[in-house]
Every structure is written in structure tokens, then in C-alpha cells.
Image: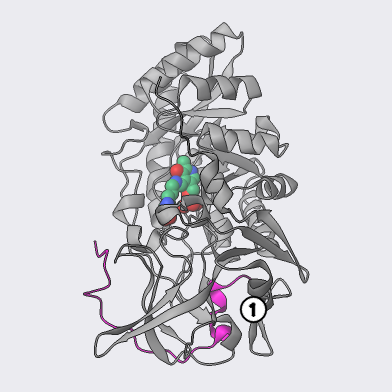
Amino acid sequence: MAKHVSAKPRAVADFKTAEDLLNVLPATAQVRDGHLCVGGVDMVDLAHEAGTALYVMDEDTIATQLRDYIKWTRYHWDEVDVVYAGKAFLSRAMAQLVADEDCCLDVSSGGELALALSAGFDPSRIYVHGNNKTDQELVECLQAGVGRIVVDSFEELERLSTLASERGVEQAVLIRVTPGIEADTHDYIKTGAEDSKFGFGLNSGSAFKAVRRASELPGIDFEGLHIHIGSQIYALQSFSAAIEVMVAFIAKIRDELGIETRLLDTGGGLGVAYGVPDEPSTIKDYGKVVIDDIKAECEKHGLPVPRMAVEPGRSIVANAGLTLYTVGVIKEIPDIRTYVSVDGGMSDNIRTSLYDAHYEALIANKADQPRTITVTVAGKHCESGDIVVSDGPLQEVERGDILCVCSTGAYAQSLSNNYNKQVRPGVVWVKDGQWRWVVNRETYDDLMRTDAIEPVR
Ligand code: LLP
């Protein structure tokens, strides 16, 4: 996988202005007096007031995507939980918005659970994931009274049974199955194939044994099955293929074990546009394919249609977000490329170096001007792979410009780090011409807070 800026063909300037980039910008994006505005807030003024680097998210876009998922899944079947995957981006404001929009929440660590609970999120609407949940995390789940735990291994099942029985509770569980489906996406974010650290293999017979064991164990209420075949998936057929084998599995569980599967959770994975030419499937089409396929397959096998759950993360927040940077050093290497360095980089967006991800960039204070030059947007870290946009089009650029990288609402802040002791940017939400912090910008004091100098023990 290309981790460096070398071998790719150079993109040609595309002459597009911000108005041509609407598929990778939040729904409220507009150009006013040459400036990019989102949620009625001028991004250039915001950058000057709140500082850069800065993550900005449009609250209305997030709420609309949550509502679209509810609408276009429940349109086909009443009993569907839309379970927002907190790993894409989680803060207390986000947890509250998810609750307000009648969605459930997927957490995958004790930390995500603690944050959701501190936001007042109803624990019975929480789904808990993880391939290596600690005893402490399982106890925290039981104490909180979480709705469902998605069990990932035999030993987790046994431990959970003991811990739940000790507390006199019966915990609803889903068994995570790896259905042996190769999703059409990047190798690092495929999770449904047989060779995976996640879940119980369907073809090996492990998943069947796990369901049987779950139905026997005290303290465990086998409610249903879970799959997550991968992320950033464009081809809806990948979901159809997984649903076909999963519903056949539900029939086998009924026929051979006499057990009813009351819930089928098909995970997340719907892809989004990162580049102007990208054409992902819509939430509407996704809802139709997933829900109708489950219904049709159940009919084929003479099964009652179960409760369903979908777990979108990226497709809720990616296009709602963007990152603002201030342009610093510009270095032109004759006949090779121009590096535009910004006040952030792989500490606030590691996706380009990790997955060779592609992003669109524009100058927020020149949003009405065409992107006529080709540049590489680099970060400020001590790493030559510290690239945010590799050979992309941009307006004529100068030091002090406010550079906007689009579609960074998912898996940018949540994967951020303090490499080079860089303080992490804060997150601002915009709505109706106003803005507020939902995650504060870190300070040097935050870096010192966990640092320790103490005598040896
Ligand atoms: N459910 C489960 C069990 C998951 O593991 C995930 C994502 C989701 C739901 C949400 O999937 P989404 O709708 O966001 O595709 N860091 C990578 C993505 C890793 C996805 C991990 N699991 C990236 O930046 O592309």
C-alpha cells in the first residue's frame, strides 16, 4: 500500500470552486463573499476566532443523516434499531443528539460506555462490542444495565455467564458471526472474512456452537446474531451476500436447535464520498436493500421476520465534518511537487497515511476561486509520510490562508493522537449561524497532566 507521496500520477487542476464540492461538504455549505460558510457560520472568521487546526461539524447534517437512517429503514420494517457507531466520532453532545433522534448507540470500550453514560444515554439502548472485553468492562456493562452485549469468543461467553449469574441478571447477547464474505473495500477495514480476529466463523461451525452454548448457559439470553463485514463499502451486493448466508444460518438454528433468533444486526459499513467523483450508495437505497433482503430471505426459509439493527458510523458523520488549518510553509520542488504545510497533520488525520485515503481540499477564504494548481498538503510532523492530501487540486495558495479539508467528520478526531506532543484540535459544532465547542482544544497542560515523575517503588 502506498504510504508515501511518490508513485501516484499527478492530479490535474480541476478548476472547481467550493460550489462544485458540495458532495463532500456538509449540507448547509455555501459560499458568501468568497468565503466558505457552514451552518451559517463563516469558516474564515471561525478559524480566526477559535484557532486552527480545528474540526468543524454541522449539527443539521448529522441530525438529517440519523433521521434518514430511521426513515429509510423503518419504511420497510417497523422494528429496526439504528445504532450509531460511536467509534466514528463520540462526544457527549453527539450521544445526546443520537438519543434525541431516537437512535441507539454502539460502544466498543469501557471508555466509550463511560462517556455515553455521563451524557445520560439510556443504557438499555446501548450495544456493546469488542473482541477482547476485559472482566472490568463486562462488569461495567452489567452494572450499567446495557441493552445488548455482542459476544465475540467462547471464553467471553463463559466469563459473561459467570459474571451475570453472580449478579442474578440475565444479559441479552448477540453472537458476532464472520460470515465469510469479502466486502469490496480496503484490506485494513474488511472484517467479514473467515480470517479475522472478530467473531465466530460461520463456515468453521464455530458460530453454530456459540449459539448452542449461549442458549445453554445461565445468565445469558441469546437474542440474536451480529455481523459487520467492513467499512466504506460502495457495493450494496456485499450486504446482500452476507444477509443471504445469515438468514440461512437462522433457519439452521431453528431447524437443528429449535431456537428462535429474535434480532439480526447487520453492522455498519455504508461508504461515503471523499472525492468529487465518488458516488456512494444512498441511505435510502441501503435501507431498501438491507431490510427488504432480510424480509425476502426470511420468507424463503419460512421464518418470522426478526427485529433488525443497523450500525452506521461513517455515513452519519463523515460529510458533516471538515478540518480547518492555517497554511504555513509552502515549498516548491521544481518539476516534482509543491508541499503546502499546515498546522496539523497525521496527529489529527491519520487516514491518509494509514489507508492511503483521498480527501478534497480548498482555501476557505478563496472559496469562489477555481482550484488551478496541484499541491500536496503536508502536516508538521517529523515523518515524511505525514501527508493529508496527496497531489490534489487547490486554489492559488499563500501563507496565512485557511485551508479546509473536506469529509473529515468520521475517524479523524476519534483516531487522533499526540505525536510530537502536538495538542489535539477541539471540535466545534455549527448550527443556525452560531457555534459551540463540543470537544475543547487540548492545551500544553493536558499533555503534562498524565506525565509522571515519581520515585521508583
Ligand atoms: N459496527 C461495528 C461492529 C464496527 O466495527 C464498525 C466499524 C461499525 C459498526 C461502523 O462502521 P461504519 O458505518 O463507520 O463503516 N478507522 C477506519 C474504519 C474502521 C471501522 C471500524 N468498525 C477508517 O478510518 O476508515
**In front here: 20 or 214?**
20
Q: Residue 91 at what x, y percent from top left?
A: 63, 47
**Mark 1 CB in 8 Å range of ligand 1?**
no
**Residue drawn at x 60%, y 58% as measured from the top left:** 426
Residue drawn at point x = 66 percent, y = 51 percent: 70
Q: What residue type is labelled 1?
A: Val
Tell me the quarter of the picture where residue 382 sits.
bottom left
Question: In this orientation, which residue lies closer to the viewer: 164 or 51?
Answer: 51
Q: Image point 45% across, 24% down: which residue?
A: 134
Up/down of 171 relative to 284, above or below = above
Q: What stretch is highlighted in magenta?
A: 1-27
Q: Is residue 338 left or right of residue 313?
A: left
Q: Picture quarter containing residue 428?
A: bottom right
Q: Quadrant of the N terminus?
A: bottom left
Q: Position of residue 88 (x, y in %)?
A: 52, 51
Locate residue 419 relative to residue 165 in the image: left or right: left
Quadrant (top left, top right, bottom left, bottom right) of the C terminus: top left
- Secondary element under disc 1, as helix, strand or loop, is helix
Classify 10 Å Cα crowding around label 1: few (below 14), some (14-19), many (20 and above). many
Any part of residue 401 in sight: yes
Residue pictured at 40% horizontal, 83% vertical: 330
Q: Nearer the viewer, residue 381 or 227?
A: 381
Q: On the image, numbered disc 1 is attached to which residue?
A: 44
Locate residue 136, reporting x and y percent. 51, 21
Q: Does the magenta stretch include residue 220?
A: no
Any part of residue 257 in sight = no
* Residue at the left extreme of this rendering: 7
Q: Which of 45 and 190 is in front in this view?
A: 45
User: Does the magenta run of residues contain 17?
Assistant: yes
Query: What predominant SS class does the magenta segment belong to?
Result: loop
Q: Position of residue 180 (x, y in %)?
A: 30, 41
